[in-house]
């Protein structure tokens, strides 16, 4: 079931989203895939497909692969550690010292090997990934992800101010030069699954000159951009000091042309975005990567995702390892629901908590849209698919398909992932 130039069917209990409002469920249904793309989902196999090979997954659940719109590969090594600080102190204490280790390629090989292997086994089929400033280590990470078969966008990080000397790039110019060399290396690797993405860490660690140079590279290459936005109060006031001419945090990116419009852009967090920032994100088509566990661990707050969904913004989920402790996006869905309930109860009862269908939508079609027609089983979508086997988690009562999915959101880990397809190719 892996060759792209074939037609094949998959049989099982199929669940996917068309809209955030409701789940599409086809019990004991057939999904037909042709040339790596979904042709359709059917309660019975249509006559035109009679005789195609069909893999029967029995009573298991078939769902779209999940998209992680924001994860830091080098931080995977210290996930679950040092969570009792807010963002800026946490960066200085935990993050920068760990990221500095990736200067040493031997260390990077060990750490990134573990990351790529665990991501392969997870429900994640697509991801937007931060590496570090180090070119060699970033290429090694990309090699591993390419081999793992996941479809990813990976960024060599840019940072030329407000970080320790042992990690900071020497100047805007050298940061840009390293980025160009990295892009040349990437080009020569001719990856099939792995794409570069420009990655200014966040405004506090990038000078105006660096942002200008990155815009030049962006214009030349047409590459997408990922960064952080309005995550933490201290960070937001710092940006206002560093860029007094910007109207709001997001405007500090937009002034350099690195905030959506013809530049595909994903911004992590958006916890404290004000009405002007939300309007700009909407007008510019900027994607929001909602990272609920990180928002809790770093005591950043809880992003108003209900507002973003109502406004029609593009919203997906991110693990934000190691602000988040796990690459498991099922838990990110559960955390998104839980965080929205606390926000509703404690902060603003006009914004109703998120529902299971909304959260499932964000993890699949919402985030998948950053990669194209990804994250749904509607016709023409790339076949990214996870087969979930929930038999390990025994229960005495009858459960509907929707209930079984809900249980997976709260309880599943890699042990439930029975099979995985990415863009029509079966990984396992
Ligand atoms: N802002 C700038 N860098 C980081 C990072 O590594 N993690 C998070 N959560 N926020 C950031
Ligand atoms: Fe982050």
Image (cartoon, rainbow, N blue to C red):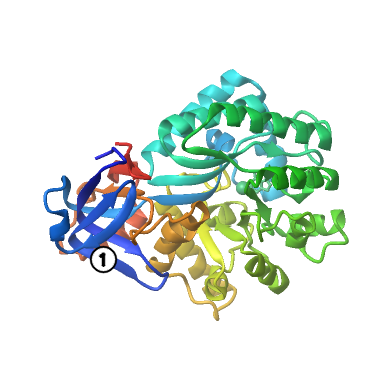
Q: How many marks?
A: 1
Q: Which residue is mark 1?
A: 25
> Quarter-wise, where is residue 373 in the image?
bottom left
> In the picture provided, is 169 more to the left or to the right than 322?
right
Q: Quadrant of the N terminus?
A: top left
In this view, the residue in front, 61 or 408, is 61
The picture places residue 173, in percent across and down from the top left corner, at 83, 35
Say which element carries label 1.
strand
Question: Which residue is drawn at the image coordinates 47% and 33% (left, top)?
Answer: 145
The picture places residue 253, in percent across and down from the top left corner, at 75, 56
In this view, the residue in front, 145 or 293, is 145
> Quarter-wise, where is residue 44 in the image?
bottom left
Question: Which residue is drawn at the image coordinates 80% and 31% (left, top)?
Answer: 174
Farthest residue to the top: give it.
Answer: 106
Question: Which residue is drawn at the image coordinates 58% and 56% (left, top)?
Answer: 295
Q: Quadrant of the C terminus?
A: top left
The picture places residue 170, in percent across and down from the top left corner, at 82, 31
Q: Is residue 422 above or below residue 32?
A: above
Q: Is residue 63 above or below residue 186?
A: below
The picture places residue 109, in percent across and down from the top left corner, at 53, 23
> In the picture provided, is 289 more to the left or to the right than 178?
left
- Is any part of residue 10 visible from this angle? yes
């Amino acid at each position: 079931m892996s060759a792209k130039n074939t037609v094949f069917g998959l049989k099982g209990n199929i669940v996917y989203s068309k809209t955030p409002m409701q789940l599409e469920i086809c019990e004991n249904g057939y999904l037909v895939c042709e040339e790596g793309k979904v042709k359709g989902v059917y309660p019975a196999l249509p006559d035109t497909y009679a005789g195609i090979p069909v893999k029967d997954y029995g009573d298991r659940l078939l769902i779209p692969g999940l998209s992680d719109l924001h994860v830091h590969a080098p931080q995977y090594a210290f996930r679950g550690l040092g969570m009792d600080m807010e963002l800026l102190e946490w960066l200085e204490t935990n993050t920068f010292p760990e990221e500095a280790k990736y200067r040493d390629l031997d260390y990077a090989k060990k750490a990134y090997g573990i990351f790529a292997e665990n991501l392969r086994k997870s429900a994640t089929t697509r991801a937007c990934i931060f590496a570090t400033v180090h070119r060699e280590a970033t290429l090694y990470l990309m090699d591993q992800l390419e081999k793992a078969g996941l479809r990813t966008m990976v960024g060599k990080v840019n940072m030329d101010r407000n970080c320790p000397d042992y990690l900071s790039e020497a100047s805007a110019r050298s940061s840009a030069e390293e980025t160009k060399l990295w892009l040349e290396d990437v080009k020569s690797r001719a990856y099939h699954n792995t794409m570069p993405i420009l990655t200014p860490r966040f405004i506090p660690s990038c000078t105006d000159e660096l942002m200008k140079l990155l815009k030049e590279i962006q214009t030349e290459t047409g590459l997408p951009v990922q960064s952080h936005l309005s995550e933490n109060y201290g960070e937001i006031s710092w940006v206002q000091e560093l860029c007094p001419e910007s109207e709001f945090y997001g405007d500090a990116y937009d002034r350099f042309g690195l905030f959506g419009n013809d530049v595909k852009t994903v911004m992590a967090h958006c916890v404290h975005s004000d009405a002007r920032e939300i309007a700009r994100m909407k007008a510019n088509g900027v994607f929001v990567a909602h990272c609920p566990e990180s928002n809790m661990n770093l005591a950043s707050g809880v992003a108003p995702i209900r507002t973003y969904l109502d406004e029609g913004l593009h919203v997906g989920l991110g693990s934000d390892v190691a602000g988040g402790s796990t690459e498991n996006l099922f838990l990110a869905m559960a955390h998104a629901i839980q965080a929205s309930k606390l926000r509703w109860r404690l902060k603003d009862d006009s914004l109703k908590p998120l529902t299971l269908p909304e959260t499932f939508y964000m993890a699949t079609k919402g985030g998948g849209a950053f990669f194209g027609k990804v994250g749904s089983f509607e016709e023409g979508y790339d076949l990214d698919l996870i087969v979930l086997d929930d038999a390990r988690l025994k229960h005495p009562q009858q459960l509907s398909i929707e209930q079984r999915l809900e249980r997976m959101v709260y309880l599943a880990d890699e042990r439930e992932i029975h099979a995985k397809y990415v863009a029509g190719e079966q990984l396992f």
